[in-house]
Amino acid sequence: KAGVTQTPRYLIKTRGQQVTLSCSPISGHRSVSWYQQTPGQGLQFLFEYFSETQRNKGNFPGRFSGRQFSNSRSEMNVSTLELGDSALYLCASSTGWQETQYFGPGTRLLVL
Amino acid sequence: GQQLNQSPQSMFIQEGEDVSMNCTSSSIFNTWLWYKQDPGEGPVLLIALYKAGELTSNGRLTAQFGITRKDSFLNISASIPSDVGIYFCAGQLKGTNAGKSTFGDGTTLTVKP
């Protein structure tokens, strides 16, 4: 079974721009969660989508949004980028009811 | 909100030594997970624990789910150079909260040959 894939792997943007990241979960997984990883804050939960609905949300501003498609693929969008948004963005998929999450390789975003 | 305290923050050990790290929480979790992350990659699941008191092994790795459901430890026996990396614990709740993990800050392991 193929693992979780994320595209792109690396991205450079400037302040004020917006960005969209993509995640394809493991086949059969209906839950996709997004996390932000930074040296200072560690791994922080952004949100989780299950069957195209946002089921859980972390404590991030409204500039961070996401969606999930009928094939369980998910996208995350960050609008009006700030320097502090530079981070490794990770997505993880699971069946949605069993707790084990499997992570993708991440997208490294650099905001200049 | 829930927080996990993971210790130690870093470890420098000699190849062949055993390693122990742990996580404690102020609140209860239904599941404890241990991950390893290499530079530039996503975390890779090592061990998942689903029941209080459960002791599970994966090769040289052994992890336990604490009886109080507020802690977990990970042991690595006979360390080798490829064990180098950052180890994270994560706690999860059940059901509709299963997609939201709370992570510790990580333990950075360095193994000297």
Image: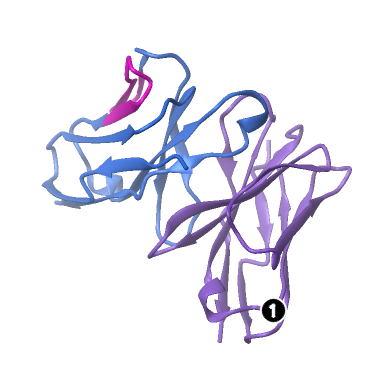
Chain colours: A purple, B blue
Q: Is residue A49 left or right of residue A69?
A: left
What residue sits 32% from the left and 27% below the top?
Answer: B71
Q: Residue furthest right?
A: A70
Relative horizontal placement of residue B61, taking residue B19 as reference (left or right)? right
Q: Is residue B31 magenta?
A: no
Q: Position of residue B52 (x, y in %)?
A: 39, 14
Choose between A86 and B15: the one closer to the eye. Answer: A86
Secondary structure of the residue carrying tag 1 is loop
| Looking at the image, residue B25 lies above or below residue A62 | above
Residue at screen point 53% across, 80% down: A83
Quadrant housing the N terminus of chain A: top right
| Rendered location of residue B72, percent (x, y) | 32, 27
Say which residue appears at 68% left-offset and 85% top-offset.
A16
Give the amino acid type for the residue marked by disc 1 in the picture.
Thr
* Residue A64 place in picture, x, y as percent: 68, 63
Residue at the spot of label 1: A80
Residue B27 lies, in percent from the top left, at: 40, 29
Which residues are the magenta region?
Answer: B56-74
